[in-house]
C-alpha cells in the first residue's frame, strides 16, 4: 500500500478574501489532531397563520437561517504527536482568522474541510481552554471549540431560494376592496384559481373578504380544481 493511501487526512481551514471564495487570502491552518467532535446545525423559521374558518393555525415556512457548525479540537505540544513545543503560534494563527481584513474591513471567509466534511462560512467564535504549560509558562496543551456560520454570496442565496418558484407556501394580507379572483390573478397569473384558493382557506363566502385577513396561498403542486 502506498504512502499516499495511508496518509492521515487532517482538518484544514483555508482563508479567502471574498464572499465568492475565489481569492485565497494566503492563510491556511491545519489541525495538529483531528476533531474530537463535530456538530452541524440547520434551522428553519415558521410562522403560524390563522385562516378564516379554521380552528387551528397553519405553519407557513418564512425562511431559513444560516447553517452552523461547531468543532472541538485538542492541541498538544508535549511531543506525543509531532514535534514538542509551544502551541501558542498555532493558536495565534487560528484566532487570527476571526480578525477583519485591513483592506476590505470584512472578516476572512473560511473553507473548513476534512474528508467528506466541507463547510464555507465565517469563523464567529474561538473558545480556548489551556490545560498544560511548560516551566516558562508556554502553553503545551489546550482544548479549542470553533463556531462557524454559513456565508453565501447573493447569487447563491437567490439560486437556493428561487423566490419565483411555484412550489412554495406563501401568505397574503387582504386589503380593503380586494377580491379573491384578483388575488389569484396576481399570485398565479390566472383569476380562475380563486376556487382552490377559497378551498385552501375554507372560505364560506369567497365573494366577501374581510380586510386584515391572512390568506394561505397553496403551492402550484397542491392547487386542485382551479381550471373549470
Image (cartoon, grey):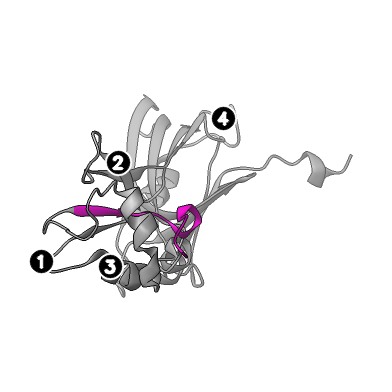
First-in-chain label (2 vs 1): 2
Camera-side mark, 2 or 3: 3
Badge 3 is on which residue? 183
Q: Name the front one of labels 3 and 4.
A: 3
Residues tagged 2 and 4 counted as in contact (Cβ below 8 A): no
Question: Along the line of sight, which residue is nearer the eye, 226 or 132?
Answer: 226
Residue 205 part of the magenta-drawn span: no
Q: CA distance from mark 2 to mark 4?
A: 59 Å
Dot 3 alpha-carbon crowd within 10 angstroms: few under 14, some 14 to 19, many 20 or more: many
Q: Which residue is mark 1?
A: 176
Q: Where does the image place residue 36, in percent across and percent down from the top left?
A: 52, 29
Element class at badge 4: loop
Residue at horizontal 34%, vertical 35%? 128
Q: Which of pointers 3 and 4 lies earlier in the amino acid sequence?
A: 4
How many numbered callouts? Answer: 4
Residue 56: which quarter of the image? top left
| Residue indicated by mark 2 | 58
| Viewer can see residue 64 | no
Q: Which span of residues is magenta-colored?
A: 214-228
Tell me where residue 2 appears, x and y as whole percent: 87, 43
Secondary element under disc 3, as helix, strand or loop, is helix
Tell me the SS state at disc 2.
strand
Q: Residues within 10 Å of mark 1 (few under 14, many from 20)?
A: few
Going from the N terminus, do you reach mark 2 or mark 4 first?
2
Tell me, yes or no, whether the two marked residues, 3 and 4, touch with CB atoms within 8 Å. no
Single out the residue that lies furthest toward the top.
131
Which mark is first along the chain, 3 or 2? 2
Figure quadrant of the N terminus:
top right
Disc 3 versus disc 1: distance between alpha carbons? Answer: 12 Å
Tell me the residue at 38%/61% (across/down): 108
Earlier residue among tags 4 and 1: 4
Residue 79: which numbered mark, if any?
A: 4
Amino acid at each position: 500500500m502506498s504512502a499516499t493511501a495511508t496518509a492521515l487526512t487532517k482538518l484544514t481551514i483555508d482563508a479567502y478574501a471574498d464572499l465568492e471564495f475565489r481569492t485565497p487570502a494566503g492563510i491556511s491552518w491545519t489541525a495538529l489532531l483531528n476533531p474530537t467532535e463535530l456538530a452541524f446545525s440547520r434551522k428553519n423559521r415558521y410562522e403560524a397563520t390563522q385562516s378564516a374558518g379554521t380552528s387551528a393555525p397553519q405553519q407557513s415556512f418564512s425562511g431559513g437561517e444560516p447553517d452552523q457548525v461547531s468543532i472541538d479540537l485538542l492541541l498538544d505540544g508535549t511531543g506525543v504527536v509531532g514535534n514538542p513545543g509551544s502551541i501558542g503560534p498555532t493558536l495565534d494563527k487560528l484566532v487570527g482568522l476571526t480578525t477583519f481584513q485591513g483592506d476590505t474591513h470584512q472578516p476572512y471567509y473560511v473553507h473548513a474541510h476534512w474528508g467528506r466534511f466541507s463547510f464555507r462560512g465565517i469563523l464567529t467564535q474561538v473558545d480556548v481552554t489551556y490545560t498544560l504549560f511548560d516551566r516558562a509558562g508556554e502553553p503545551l496543551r489546550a482544548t479549542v471549540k470553533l463556531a462557524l456560520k454559513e456565508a453565501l454570496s447573493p447569487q447563491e442565496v437567490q439560486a437556493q431560494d428561487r423566490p419565483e418558484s411555484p412550489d412554495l407556501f406563501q401568505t397574503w394580507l387582504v386589503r380593503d376592496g380586494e377580491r379573491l379572483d384578483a388575488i389569484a390573478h396576481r399570485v398565479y397569473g390566472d383569476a380562475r384559481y380563486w376556487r382552490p384558493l377559497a378551498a385552501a382557506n375554507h372560505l364560506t363566502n369567497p365573494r366577501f373578504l374581510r380586510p386584515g385577513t391572512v390568506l394561505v396561498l397553496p403551492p402550484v403542486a397542491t392547487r386542485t380544481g382551479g381550471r373549470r
